[in-house]
Image (cartoon, rainbow, N blue to C red):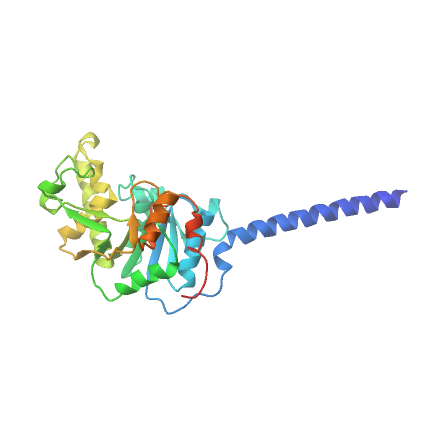
């Protein structure tokens, strides 16, 4: 009877091994999500970075779609991506210690992407997009990128405002005044989808260092952290250096400050909109956003 016992043990071990193998294989396939599509077009002139808290499946699908149509795309994560996936060569992260060297501790993922860009001197222009921006078809993003491929503007944004009597109600204006960033240079921009130049990245780095020096001179209770808010800091440092800042064509884009509902998306589609913000859910109406297909 002993041989039956041995056969039973071997059978149980074999079943356990097979179950373990398929579990690991399934997990590995999920981690390699953005490598499972066909080879990307190598002719792209565009670089783009999705800003996300974590590399969720939804974020990785959008990354896949951009890569497939030839965009040199990455995801900047606010949390260490290795906690979520084993494959991280297109997932970026800058640790808190690196941010602290610049005195940055507010905008998190926006801080991380700019500190990373400070050192990527080969990047002349880069599109930045928040992870709740989506589209009906990724080719609409490429069309927008192509439209400005030969435009030398240092900031392309959905909207740009300047400090004047008509904009005093904007909530992100600093309440404390600093000589290094005079009020007549204060600007604001809407950056859920924006493009920045190397010149603007360098200007950002310069003034972040200036703000850190200023903070060391003042008590922390006297310093207004709105100076670091990305929708203020990015255009204001551009204005300080007299860089070119433009509002891009957003005729096919729908922007809402609250999360768009299915009814909002349905109405926008009827009005010819093809790029959307903010979409916090997997909308059945936008099911083709990450489908890989020819234009």
Q: Residue lying farthest top?
A: 221
Q: Residue at left 21%, top 46%?
A: 233
Q: Residue at left 88%, top 43%?
A: 2
Q: In this view, does 101 lie to the left or right of 207?
A: right
Q: Is residue 279 above or below residue 35?
A: above
Find residue 149 and report its image quarter. Answer: bottom left
The quarter of the picture where the C terminus appears is: bottom left
Answer whether residue 255 is visible to the viewer in this image: yes
The spot of residue 29 in percent (x, y) is 55, 53
Q: As rendered, which of 93 and 157 lies closer to the eye?
A: 157
Find residue 288 and report its image quarter. Answer: bottom left
Q: Residue at left 34%, top 55%?
A: 274
The spot of residue 246 in percent (x, y) is 19, 56
The number of discs equals: 0
The spot of residue 163 in percent (x, y) is 12, 44
Answer whether residue 122 is visible to the viewer in this image: no
Q: Residue lying farthest bottom?
A: 43
The quarter of the picture where the N terminus appears is: top right
Q: As rendered, which of 282 and 179 lies closer to the eye?
A: 282
The spot of residue 61 in percent (x, y) is 45, 53
Q: Is residue 232 above or below residue 62?
A: above
Q: Residue lying farthest right?
A: 1
């Amino acid at each position: 009877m002993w041989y039956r016992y041995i056969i039973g043990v071997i059978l149980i071990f074999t079943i356990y091994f097979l179950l373990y193998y398929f579990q690991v294989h399934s997990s590995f396939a999920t981690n390699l999500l953005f490598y499972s599509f066909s080879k990307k077009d190598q002719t792209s002139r565009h670089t783009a970075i999705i800003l996300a808290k974590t590399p969720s499946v939804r974020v990785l699908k959008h990354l896949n779609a951009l890569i497939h149509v030839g965009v040199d795309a990455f995801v900047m994560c606010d949390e260490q991506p290795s906690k979520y996936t084993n494959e991280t060569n297109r997932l970026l992260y800058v640790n808190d210690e690196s941010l602290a060297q610049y005195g940055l501790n507010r905008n998190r993922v926006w801080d991380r992407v700019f500190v990373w860009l400070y050192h990527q001197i080969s990047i002349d222009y880069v599109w930045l997009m928040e992870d709740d921006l989506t589209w009906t078809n990724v080719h609409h993003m490429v069309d927008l990128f192509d439209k400005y491929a030969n435009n030398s503007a240092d900031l392309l944004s959905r909207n740009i405002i300047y400090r004047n009597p008509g904009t005093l109600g904007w909530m992100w204006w600093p309440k404390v005044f600093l000589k290094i960033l005079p009020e007549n240079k204060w600007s604001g921009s809407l950056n859920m989808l924006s493009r920045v130049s190397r010149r603007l990245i360098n200007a950002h780095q310069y003034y972040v260092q200036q703000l850190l020096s200023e903070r060391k001179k003042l008590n922390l209770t006297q310093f207004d952290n709105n100076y670091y808010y990305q929708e203020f800091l990015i255009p204001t440092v551009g204005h300080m250096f007299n860089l070119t800042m433009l509002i891009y064509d957003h005729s096919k884009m729908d922007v809402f400050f609250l999360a768009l509902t299915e009814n909002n998306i349905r109405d926008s589609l009827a009005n010819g909109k093809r790029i959307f913000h903010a979409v916090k859910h997997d909308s059945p109406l936008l099911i083709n956003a990450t489908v890989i297909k020819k234009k």
